[in-house]
Amino acid sequence: MSTTDETPTGIDAPVGADQAVRDIAEVAAVQVITTAAVHLMSAAAVKCGLAEGDDAEELKDLDEARKLITALAALVVASSPDIGNEHARSLRDGLRSLQLAFREASVVPDAPGEGPGEKYTGSVV
């Protein structure tokens, strides 16, 4: 049994790749955007030290959290006009909560407007 299929370009692709492409084509853009945002939020929360469990402090990495929150802010701000107020409001609320959690976790707080993602959202303080 072969594990690859010959594509029209001559490049071997994993079996099922065509089905995966068809499956993703059926997913609405708003669902892809919100799923990506939730993944960024979850990762940022862990990196801000908000994970449950005894090892939450060990998992904290504010440098990584800053990057994730900034990426999330860019995604939320850029996509908000297209995904509708219901979805955008929830994402903005989650983003703001992460921005505030980051400020709380920081030993030396950023100046207002200089925190992660605040160049996209404006100051959260």
Image (cartoon, rainbow, N blue to C red):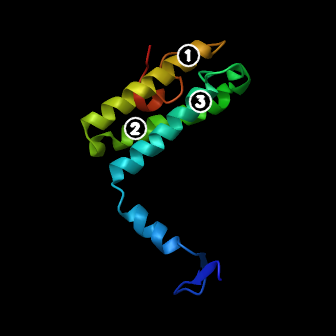
Between 78 and 44, the one nearer to me in the picture: 44
Q: Element under label 2? A: helix
Between 111 and 78, the one nearer to me in the picture: 78
Left or right, 85 with respect to 46, comes to left
Quadrant including the N terminus: bottom right
Q: Residues within 10 Å of mark 2 (few under 14, many from 20)?
A: many
**Res 103 label:** 1
At horizontal 41% and vertical 64% (from top left) the residue drawn is 23
The residue beneath circle 2 is: 76
Q: From the top left corner, tell me how far across and down residue 40 is, in percent.
A: 52, 38
Q: Element under label 1? A: helix
Q: Residues within 10 Å of mark 3 (few under 14, many from 20)?
A: many
Do labels 1 and 3 touch, CB within 8 Å?
no
**Res 66 label:** 3
At horizontal 41% and vertical 28% (from top left) the residue drawn is 121
Precedes in sequence: disc 3 or disc 2: 3
